[in-house]
Amino acid sequence: MALEYDLLNENVKKCQYAVRGELYLRASELQKEGKKIIFTNVGNPHALGQKPLTFPRQVVALCQAPFLLDDPNVGMLFPADAIARAKHYLSLTSGGLGAYSDSRGLPGVRKEVAEFIQRRDGYPSDPELIFLTDGASKGVMQILNCVIRGEGDGILVPVPQYPLYSATISLLGGSLVPYYLDESENWGLDVNNLRQSVAQARSQGISVRAMVIINPGNPTGQCLSEANLKEILKFCYNEKLVLLGDEVYQQNIYQDERPFISSKKVLMDMGSPFSKGVQLVSFHTVSKGYWGECGQRGGYFEMTNFPPRVVEEIYKVASIALSPNVSAQIFMGLMVSPPKPGDISYDQFARESKGILESLRRRAKIMTDGFNSCKNVVCNFTEGAMYSFPQIRLPPGALQAAKQAGKVPDVFYCLKLLEATGISTVPGSGFGQKEGVFHLRTTILPAEEEMPEIMDSFKKFNDEFMAQYENGFGYSRM
Ligand code: DCS
């Protein structure tokens, strides 16, 4: 029978992914009509003008075109350390970039990832427990696929959250168990909230199996403290939950008070019985940080405290897709072992990466300050990641107008913003938020020199919108 809409898998219909939702579709339409659109809906740095880092592109270019290595002029176009690295990575493959690799990824690259984790955390890491993936997304989907057996299985997910989690849980037919981050505490995570969420889910017959943390947070931008991570890990130990640590923004830190600290390190620091008792999967990617190589689709996950039989089953499932992208694996290898001081390419690499991070740090501040200068907008500082998530306090007149237009209030606001300014954002409802509270998410990625103009145009729109709908009575608020 043909695949009619009525015959689609119901889980496919249920699944929602706002980052490419109604706002994005409308923005694409407007762009086709010739309007200038500033796409701040996706954390996709190169699409907003970020230049690729030179060294990794040189290495991968040589791996893609290995005949260049035989050209007598290769040394005029490529530095010697890039040439050496390209030869190194080609020697790790069995047939170059055009050949499938092991379904977990090239053993040599997994070893480099393990060495990186060991340097970062100060604890051993086993390459056999590291799987390379096509972006972190595929890793998250693989693990959730192994955890979720049906709607009786619950996954604790922060609200607001990045909709990869809600969408995948819907697709796999599991149950999302929300825990709320506290906006008035800089989007902090209160373990008492977690307890309540688990108790409530259990009272509905749901077996809570795993917990997701996003650190630094998307869309909320907070960095978890070591003390907070300890509480979370203890909680997972006591409640027998697998912790999924989404750490894709670990390089994106814009303050000095709370540097990134990995869940693995905190777990190992806690010692027995926790260090051997909590099952942890940590995710990383080449899409974020100062790399921003989203289109390459490279990622990894590391498993801690998983029995060998479970790892084998995860390997089996990974094998169905044969192999992750091999060129992306090389990007991952380069990300975890970049040029070192003394290498020919070191200075340039350091200059480029520092330039990107410092600019992001300034942009995070320009955005937060810009939002906080607007009428009825309050915004926590972006401590890390790539997003700003201001709360928009909509006057009753705007809520009414949204209702008349048949739109969720923040969708209504974001559509008006898009039409007026070309700024394409994602409404807070796409990430989850408390009832009656509204937000939008924007990336902090537009070029730094364009940022003041973007914020001016946002402010002009917002303040006029508020003036239009304000009638002197109460607001939606937290
Ligand atoms: N985890 C989080 C928290 C993310 O924000 C993203 C991407 C991913 C995982 C997956 O990234 P890759 O599959 O590319 O490794 N963030 C999306 C977002 O919110 N905007 O852009 C993409």
Image (cartoon, helix red, strand yellow):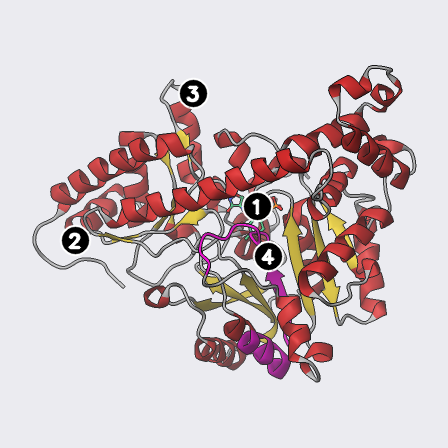
Q: Earlier in the sequence, mark 2 or mark 3?
A: 3
Task: Report whether 302 appears left or right of 153.
Answer: right
Label 2 to label 1, Cα distance in Å? 40 Å
* Residue at image coords 7%, 54%: 472
Dot placed on the residue nearer the N-terminal end, 2 or 1: 1
| 477 lies above or below 321 | below
Of 274 and 172, the residue lying toward us: 274
Give, as a single range, the part of the protein colored magenta.
230-256
The residue wearing badge 3 is: 32
Q: Residue furthest left?
A: 472
Q: Residue 261: x and y, percent?
A: 58, 64
Q: Amino acid at mark 3?
A: Lys
1 or 4: tag closer to the N-terminus: 4
Helix, strand or loop under label 3: helix
Give 151 or 165, whichever is nearer the viewer.
165
Q: Nearer the viewer, mark 4 or mark 3?
A: 4
Q: Amino acid at mark 1?
A: Gly
Determine whether the residue tagged by mark 4 lies in a helix, strand or loop: loop
Q: CA distance from mark 2 to mark 4?
A: 39 Å
Which percent across, then down, holds residue 229?
A: 55, 72
Image x and y of residue 230, in percent: 56, 76
Asked if the residue at tag 3 contacts the one at tag 4, i.e. Cβ–Cβ closer than 8 Å, the answer is: no
> Quick check: is the Cβ at mark 4 less than 8 Å away from ligand 1?
no
- The disc placed on residue 396 is 2
Q: Which residue is mark 1?
A: 289
Going from N to C along the chain, the mark reached first, 3 or 1, is: 3
Q: Badges 2 and 3: C-beta atoms under 8 Å apart?
A: no
- Depth check, mark 1 against mark 4: the one in front is 1
Q: Is residue 446 magenta?
A: no
